[in-house]
Image (cartoon, grey):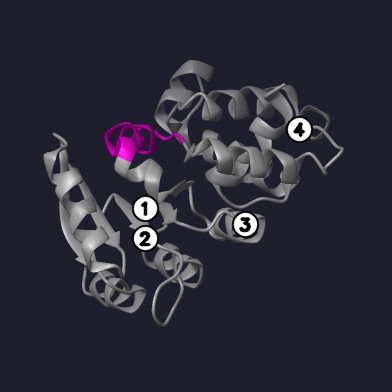
Amino acid sequence: MLKIALVEDDETLRNSMESILNLSCGYEIIYSFSNAESLLSELNLGLKPDIILLDILLPGMSGIEAIPHIKEMLPNVYIVMSSVLEDSDSIYESLKAGSVGYITKDMFLGDIKETIAIIANGGSIMSPRIARKVVTFFQKNNSSIDEKLSEREQEVVNLITQGYSYKMIAEKCDISINTVREYIKRIYTKLQINSRGQLFALYKSQKIF
């Protein structure tokens, strides 16, 4: 069962989000918090969620500021931003920091089950309006992904953006998981990114049309 941590300072909204998740088969809220500091304290004590749903506008430390601290303790955790903000800076900074998705709260309340399933399977998720903003941002980069990557690296990128896990990529390409990780490291370096969410956004900006 997937373990989910929820960080939301609005108590009414937090309770609604908890209820929706608890009604979705296969999900377990292990903890919910009203601020990032409380989450970090529990992570430091050994809390290990699979997915963290993180608000941006929080009292004290913001959600974006919390991401590097979270990733330091749990490098493989999936962080999805849940916010009312739709400005380009917030979106970009969240992806740059290491989140794998960015959804508006109306999208969360609408179809969280599908959102969690996509994230758990190694994909990224954005609401349509957010995706359009990301596309617009990355279209400013004139160099295409294909021009920067080798043929094998392009293949790995295509598989990642289709939702393949590292293990699945290794099996499909007949290589080891360590080799997959090395390809990912080289891809991130060449594209000057540092997260799956950024890779997804960059890929979509150049392949969507």
Marks 2 and 1: CB-CB under 8 Å? yes
Q: Is residue 30 visible?
A: yes
**Which of the two labelled residues, at mark 1 and mark 4, occupies the earlier sequence position?**
1
Q: CA distance from mark 2 to mark 4?
A: 29 Å
C-alpha span from label 3 to label 2: 27 Å
Q: Main secondary structure of the magenta part?
A: helix
Residue carrying label 3: 87
Q: Do residues under tags 2 and 4 come within 8 Å of each other at their CB atoms?
A: no
Few, some or many residues within 10 Å of mark 1 (<14, 14–19, 20+): some
Label 2: which residue? 74
Identify the secondary structure beneath mark 1. Answer: loop
In this picture, is 186 found above or below 174?
below
Q: Quadrant of residue 141?
A: top right
Magenta stretch, residue numbers: 110-123
Point out the image quarter for the N terminus: top left
Amino acid type shown at disc 2: Leu
Q: Which disc, if any, is residue 77?
A: 1
Question: Which residue type does callout 4 highlight?
Answer: Ile
The tag earlier along the polypeptide, 3 or 1, is: 1
**Direction from residue 85 to residue 10 in the image, left or right:** left
Q: Which residue type carries mark 1? A: Val
